[in-house]
Image (spheres, helix red, strand yellow):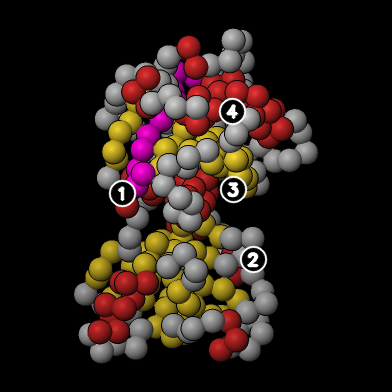
């Protein structure tokens, strides 16, 4: 397979993304390079972990995913090559694989330490170009994970829940992130809400102390500027304001509790 996806916080106004692509295509001209996004907010590893988890599954097995949101670049933190669900991920070891690791069993994981696969000269501040990009190209060309460096069974994970907790009164979860429309995306999975319905409940959704109302199918079921809760395209409970921005109503998302009861 020759697909390489890219997800970074580099933005597109500078030469960073172009440089990474240039290295990959110079070493593996047959590679198909696909941008997931380069608009992760700088250093926002949590958001990067969510986007990577939500997007990788739509690509065929064998795809190489290069993801860089790396506030620790140049420090002793490791770079990892890991295989989950038949996909390969090249990332700094800082939590970017947290949600993928919560859902899937690791198939293989190696520290990227074999300098044979690096660029001849490695910048201390641009490992995406000088280490991960050539490694991605060499994987496309047939290099195997074990050739990149020693096996490891340790990786950093971020301290947030993959699934909401089941409580006697219902479900209690967290906001994972907000999308560009200002919708709040939670860790309450659709199957968890289905479980409440099976038990005969007509659940109401709460964000903090704010009652959003019952679960809806989509935005059109409420009038503009009204709250609406629904299961989004990623299979997670989302909370929005029809033609508005739910995120603007709250402060720190990491401390926002969402309940379904």
**Does the segment drawn in magenta span residue 124?**
no
**How far is the residue under mark 3 from the one under mark 4?**
19 Å
Residue at the right extreme, as displayed: 13
The C terminus lies in quadrant: bottom left
- Spatial CA distance of label 3 from label 1 is 20 Å
Q: Is residue 248 visible?
A: no
On screen, residue 229 versus residue 194, left or right, reads right
Spatial separation of the CA atoms under disc 1 and disc 2: 29 Å
Q: Which residue is mark 4?
A: 28
What residue do we see at 35% from left, 84% from top?
Answer: 203
Q: Crowdedness of circle 3 by 10 Å Cα count: few (<14), some, many (20+)?
A: some
Q: Are marks 1 and 4 in contact (CB under 8 Å)?
A: no
CA distance separating discs 1 and 4: 29 Å
Q: Which residue is mark 2?
A: 181
Residue 121 percent coordinates (x, y): 61, 10
Of label 2 and label 3, which has the lower sequence position?
A: 3
The residue at which mark 3 appears reads as 36
Q: Residue at x 29, y 87 (%)?
A: 201
Secondary structure found at label 4: loop
The foreground one among 166 and 95 is: 95
Mark 1 and mark 2 lie on one chain; the one further toward the N terminus is 1
Mark 3 or mark 4, earlier in chain: 4
Identify the residue position indicated by label 1 in the image: 104
Q: Identify the magenta region.
A: 75-86
Q: Which of pointers 1 and 4 lies earlier in the amino acid sequence?
A: 4
Query: How many numbered callouts?
Result: 4
**In x, y percent, where is residue 160?**
37, 50
Precedes in sequence: disc 3 or disc 1: 3
């Amino acid at each position: 397979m020759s697909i390489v996806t890219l997800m970074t916080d580099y933005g597109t106004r500078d030469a960073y993304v172009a440089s990474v692509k240039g290295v990959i295509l110079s070493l593996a001209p047959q590679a198909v390079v696909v941008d997931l996004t380069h608009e992760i907010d700088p250093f926002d590893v949590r958001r990067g972990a969510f986007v990577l988890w939500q997007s990788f599954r739509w690509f065929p097995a064998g795809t190489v995913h290069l993801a860089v949101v790396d506030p620790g670049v140049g420090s002793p933190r490791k770079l990892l090559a890991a295989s989950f669900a038949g996909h390969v991920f090249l990332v700094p070891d800082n939590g970017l694989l947290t949600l993928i690791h919560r859902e899937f069993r690791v198939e293989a994981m190696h520290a990227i330490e074999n300098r044979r696969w690096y660029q001849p000269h490695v910048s201390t501040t641009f490992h995406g170009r000088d280490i991960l990009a050539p490694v991605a190209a060499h994987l496309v060309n047939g290099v195997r994970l074990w050739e990149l460096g020693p096996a490891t069974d340790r990786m950093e994970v971020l301290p947030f829940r993959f699934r909401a907790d089941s409580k006697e009164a219902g479900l209690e979860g967290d906001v994972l992130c907000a999308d560009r429309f200002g919708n709040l995306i939670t860790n309450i999975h659709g199957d968890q809400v289905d479980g409440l319905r099976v038990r005969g409940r007509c659940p109401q959704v709460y964000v903090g102390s704010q009652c959003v109302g019952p679960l809806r199918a989509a935005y059109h079921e409420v009038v503009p500027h009204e709250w609406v809760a629904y299961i989004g395209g990623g299979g997670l409970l989302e909370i929005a304001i029809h033609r508005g921005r739910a995120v603007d109503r709250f402060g720190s998302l990491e401390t926002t509790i969402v309940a379904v009861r």
